[in-house]
Amino acid sequence: MATVVRKRDLRASATGCERAFGFLTTDFGYRHVSTTIRDAGFRIDYAGPVLGVRLDWEHGDPFFVWLVRLVDGDFPPRSGIRPDTPLDYLDLESLEDVVGYERQVETGDFSPLPDETTARLVAESLRSCGASLLRGDLGRWGAVETYIKQRFRDNLVKHRAYDLGRQLGWF
């Protein structure tokens, strides 16, 4: 039997996330672009001069926090991870790994609807790990991108997805 996520619970969670991530507007000058409540999740977008931040939760998926390299001030579509293509989306978890930040909360697969505590802890992580990126200093972007691409390639090997890896240009 499928779990039903009630719209009022989604709205309450999104509102809690907006409060927790409010520092983006007050401390970094980001603009709250939109909050979208979907059938089984929500998306909240913030835009700064160089980067955007996207909070994304869908039932059965992780609670994603994306740092997004904006294109002409807009969020570009997400594209596949290819060895020779720059990434426009970096996930907070990868940034945490690169800087050695110890996560205070698990946001992986099948994570529950974010509550106030989860939202606050994840927001603290973004503020701690991503302050320079949020200010527009992309000096760390390349290291995180390399980390993501290497992890992707390692997973192709781990799961013996050599044909897929060849199709995507990895092997």
Image: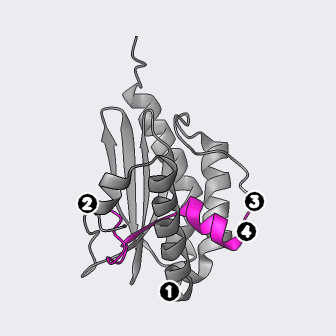
Q: Position of residue 65 (x, y in %)?
A: 49, 58
As helix, strand or loop, the secondary structure at mark 2 comes to helix
Q: Position of residue 136 (x, y in %)?
A: 48, 86
As helix, strand or loop, the secondary structure at mark 4 comes to loop
**Is 99 colored magenta in this rendering?**
yes
Give the number of the mark in front: 2 or 1. Answer: 2
Q: CA distance from mark 3 to mark 2?
A: 35 Å
Of residue 100 and residue 21, the one placed in the foreground of this image is 100
Query: Closer to the N terminus: mark 2 or mark 1?
Result: 1
Horizontal side, residue 97 vs residue 162: left or right: right
Q: Position of residue 75 (x, y in %)?
A: 29, 68
The residue identified by callout 2 is 167
Give the number of the mark in front: 3 or 2. Answer: 2
Disc assigned to residue 100 = 4
Give the image quarter of residue 6: top left
Query: Closer to the N terminus: mark 3 or mark 2?
Result: 3
The vertical placement of 54 against 70, above or below, is: above
Question: Mark 1 is on which residue type?
Answer: Leu
**Crowd tier of the residue under label 1, counting other residues whose Cα lies within 10 Å: few below 14, some 14–19, many 20 or above:** some
Q: Are marks 1 and 4 in contact (CB under 8 Å)?
A: no
Q: Start and end of the magenta stretch?
A: 80-101
The residue identified by callout 1 is 138
Disc assigned to residue 73 = none
Q: Residue at x 37, y 50 (%)?
A: 43
Quadrant of image for the C terminus: bottom left
